Image: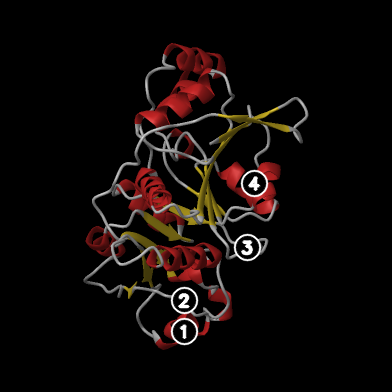
Amino acid sequence: MCVHHNAKNRNQIRNAATSILGKQQKLTMTPYTIAVSQCALFRQETGYIDPGDAFPFVKALTMVNQRLSELGPAIKERFKIVLIPTNSQDMDPLKNSIENHNLNIDQICEITGKKTLLDHLNEIKPVLYLSTTPQNVKDAINEGFGAATLLKGDYDKHSDEGLRVAFDGDGVLFSDDSEKVTKEKGLEAFFQNEIENEDTPLKLGPLRDFFKALAHLQELFKKEKKNSPIRTYLVTSRATSSPGIRALKSLRENNLEINEAFFLSGAHKGPVLKAFKPHIFFDDYMQHVKEALHYGVIGAHVPYGVRNE
């Protein structure tokens, strides 16, 4: 794993090597279900014809599935992509868009008065749910699912060669316990808390199951001695001192590995994100998500914790 920190000049990021060892945790849910709303996958304003904000991410998921199938019949793990329509009145245009864009969608749910969104989520148990409707995402988070709201915008084009996923730390990969300290007692108390609890792992956050799925699939490629098409990134405002050390120890304690970590000490995230162009970036702070959008990066807001109360 590569670890990066912010220097006084924000454009200079120094590399340092740190190893996190251990087997990846294996989830009990296979395949790993990704639920995506119709408005996130296709643009509503064009009649669900043109690709939406989740399209590059979903396209990359299908590429990972193809690479997994090439590992041999013994490998059963896959991403299962489930599409949740805005309504079920006219499904033909939606199905035509899926076919025209050559997308492999495993299941299309049917939202009715008798079966709500949460009913479907509890049935399919996704490791991640994406939507452009904030209230639906909040409901999913409150129900215990990893979920995020995609912001609409114009994004840079992505390569189909791999899947790159970037995460914020607190309130996304980790719980918001440390953010609560900052809110209640201030930044100085936060740093003191991290020093005192450097060896105490942070609890995992709302996107833990999705991150575990990525880590497990990466391990499959490693065991087969194949290059993984998946790369994960931690992009956090934490510093490389005790706050950053605690984050890395928390991942190690949970037998999880991240490919690259950027500890920015409060500096802007946009330039770093633009440098490696993730297919999606998750953050619980709306300002960071909007900054990602400004730099042409697909941002997803995780409405979790004290930042979103």
CB within 8 Å, label 3 to label 4? no
Coloring scheme of the render? secondary structure
| Nearer-N-terminus badge (4/1) | 1
CB within 8 Å, label 4 to label 1? no
Could you tell me the amino acid type at mark 1? Glu
Residue 98: x %, y % from top left = 46, 80
Identify the residue at horizontal 46%, vertical 86% (top origin).
96
Question: Mark 3 highlights which residue?
Answer: 158
| Nearer-N-terminus badge (1/3) | 1
For residue 99, the mark is: 1
CB within 8 Å, label 1 to label 2? yes
Q: Is residue 182 visible?
A: yes
Real-space Cα distance between discs 4 and 1? 32 Å
Side of 123 where 62 appears, left or right: right
Residue 119: x %, y % from top left = 24, 62
Instruction: Describe the element under mark 1 as helix, strand or loop.
Output: helix
Tag 1: Cα neighbours inside 10 Å, few (<14), some, or many (≥20)?
Answer: few
Question: Mark 2 highlights which residue?
Answer: 103
Question: Mark 4 highlights which residue?
Answer: 273
Instruction: Describe the element under mark 3 as helix, strand or loop.
Output: loop
Could you tell me the amino acid type at mark 4? Leu
Could you tell me the amino acid type at mark 3? His
Residue 266: x %, y % from top left = 64, 29
Please, is residue 227 above or below residue 96 in the view? above
Give the camera-side residue of 239 and 43: 239
Side of 77 where 16 appears, left or right: right
Please, is residue 285 above or below residue 152 in the view? above
Real-space Cα distance between discs 3 and 4? 13 Å
